[in-house]
Image (tube, helix red, strand yellow):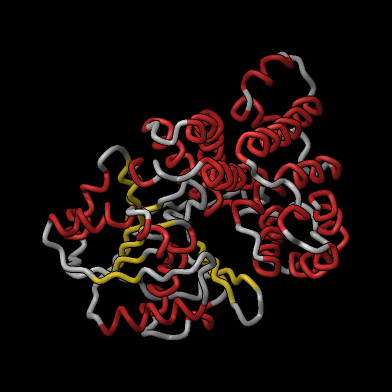
Amino acid sequence: MQGFEFSCPTKIVCGQHALDKLPGELSDRGVKHPLVMTDAGLVKLGVAAKLTDVLDAAGVAYDVFDQVPPDSSMDVVNQVAQLYAQRGCDGFVAIGGGSVIDTTKGAAASLACEGVDFATLQGAEILQNDMPPFIAVPTTAGTGSEVTLVAVVADTRKHAKLSFTSYKLVPHVAVLDPALTASLPPKLTATTGMDALTHAVEAYTSIQKNPVSDAFAVKAIELISQNLPTACRDGGNVEARTNLALGSLMAGAAFSNAMVGIVHAIGHSLGGLCHIPHGQAMMMLLPHCVAYNLDTGTHAGLYGELLPYLAPARAASLGANASSDARDGAFCEHLFALNDLYHDSYGVPLKLSEMGVERDQLEAVAKQARYDGAALYNKTEITVDVAMRILEAAY
């Protein structure tokens, strides 16, 4: 076995009423005046109030920034860092999806570096200083950002998504409370859940995989596949919502250490250039990228190893003596079937053409994907031709 490193330093607080423990977690870290980060949609839906009500009941003073955009951006990161300093805050609580948590990571990292422009910190392990205390409270079960060392922030001027990677970016606490995802509509539940599934699948097939990340990835796939259909059908199902949130977190921990690959390289470019929501891009691209990887022969057997966790009934029907090729193929077929299920049941689009992407945009997406950081961890080089082949298949 080759040597490896695995780190998941985040404290995990999971289960019904987990949010009630927030004041204690802040107190343990000496935080008396946090800046609560969220977005206008969560305020309007009353989801953010579930958190601020807990703080109010505990007598915790706080300020709120509720203007995080759907795609976190450099401008907002710098704006938040300034607000934090002006209001005399001493910690962060982020309640929201990946954009809210990534924006908070950016602002916290900027403050850790004495308020420097976050854009200057792009790359891997450039951060040297610790962030202020940071508690992440996800409201979607998708990005896993509450435990990852990655922040993806949009440069709106260059129409690109920039990746920042550092163990210094990992939140100190993740609070998983099913009450916060119960109101997520089925369509968004499906796309964010498939985003989490993509993290686990790519972590398991990455060139940087290791036995610990594999264990996290496999359990994540099992939790997501078993609970995503139920959570879509019955959003108030506490057990399904809790398990889905935990699966998303475990997938995040897996890919935070093993990294991702071709699906994310192309997906990031689609988000930056065509403004396709990240979870939607992951869901759309995953089966096409798996099919491509199987065609190249570089992932032979790996996908089949995951089949019993993704689709136990399909694995059982193949029998114990099925070839690795048959198992690999069944895995890919099941991903396409899942996408068809969510398309037919909830109207999730499966083609780029359905989402307003023009065919003449694809080449620019393919060129940018080639240089995305995630491309480094794919087993084969992602050339423009490779990316175009996948984009055309998804068009």
Give me the residue at 37% from left, 68% from top: 66
Give me the residue at 43% from left, 66% from top: 169
Q: Give the image quarter of residue 367.
A: bottom right
| Relative to 4, residue 88 above or below | below
Give left or right: position of 54 versus 211.
left
Q: Quadrant of the N terminus?
A: top right
User: Front-most of 324 and 181?
Assistant: 181
User: Front-most of 192 and 221?
Assistant: 192
Give me the residue at 50% from left, 40% from top: 216
Give the x, y percent position of residue 290.
75, 42
Give the x, y percent position of residue 199.
59, 48
Give the x, y percent position of residue 213.
54, 44
| Relative to 52, residue 182 above or below | above
Give left or right: position of 71 versus 32.
right
Give the x, y percent position of residue 28.
18, 58
Number of numbered discs overlaid on the protein picture? 0
Give left or right: position of 324 versus 230.
right
Q: Is residue 126 visible?
A: yes
| Relative to 149, residue 122 above or below | below
Q: Is residue 1 visible?
A: no
